[in-house]
Image (cartoon, rainbow, N blue to C red):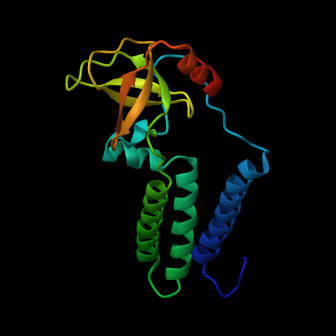
Amino acid sequence: MLFINLTIFQNIIFIIAILSAIILIVYLILPALDYYKPKEIVNCDDIDSQTEPYENFNGFIKSAFKIKGSLIFLVFASWSCFSFSFFLVDWLAILIGVFIGAGATIVVGLLGRQPVGENGDLAIVSIKIPEKHKGVGKVILLESNSEVDAESTGKAIKKGKKVVVIQNLISKVIVKKLKHSKAKNKQINQSK
């Protein structure tokens, strides 16, 4: 037993809380110390990006409970379960801990959302964009290497064409085709 005055349940939850907090801290610190940097590799036309899971609520919930979200859930759930176990029955402490952990994960997921694209960002069409108001296609933003939904300002834009973001909507961007000029091609080459 870790602590004689604690129940077996409290000892187990306390150990889980300590270990999950240590793992979360290490997971958050390593990228800052340059020991671990996740890499995003584009090897096909349709890539998964950090913005695609947010297309609907179910997708957002699934994306929130990945490694970071799972660790946050475990930390908040175990610490609150441990705290509530002192004055509530074990099953009620677990239930409250699960709700607090899920709430913390969703809040962190909402705070960690990244914007889809900014005005002036350059992109390449990965899935043909239909005419204005006739549907959406997809573009790969060159700066973040992420794929997002896109709508044209006028005529359809073929796959592989270079475009620029002119407006950022909630879950998609409005783009227009770049004219073929040396100055703009230099900008695109520099952004790669």
- Quarter placement of the N terminus: bottom right
Name the residue located 31 percent from the left edge and 43 percent from the top edge: 56
Name the residue located 42 percent from the left edge and 32 percent from the top edge: 165
- Quarter placement of the C terminus: top right
118 sits left or right of 71 in the view: left
Question: From the viewer's perspective, is residue 73 above or below residue 184?
Answer: below
16 sits left or right of 84 in the view: right
Q: Quadrant of residue 29?
A: bottom right
Question: From the viewer's perspective, is residue 153 above or below residue 32?
Answer: above
User: Residue 116 appears at what percent x and percent y?
Assistant: 43, 40
Question: From the viewer's perspective, is residue 26 above or below residue 114?
Answer: below
132 sits left or right of 187 in the view: left
**Which is more toward the observer, 125 or 182?**
182
How many marks the image carries: the answer is: 0
Name the residue located 33 percent from the left edge and 41 percent from the top edge: 169
User: Residue 54 appears at what percent x and percent y?
Assistant: 38, 43
* Residue 92 appears anywhere in the view: yes
**Which is more toward the observer, 180 or 50?**
180
User: Residue 129 appears at what percent x and percent y?
Assistant: 32, 19
**Which is more toward the observer, 86 or 28?**
28
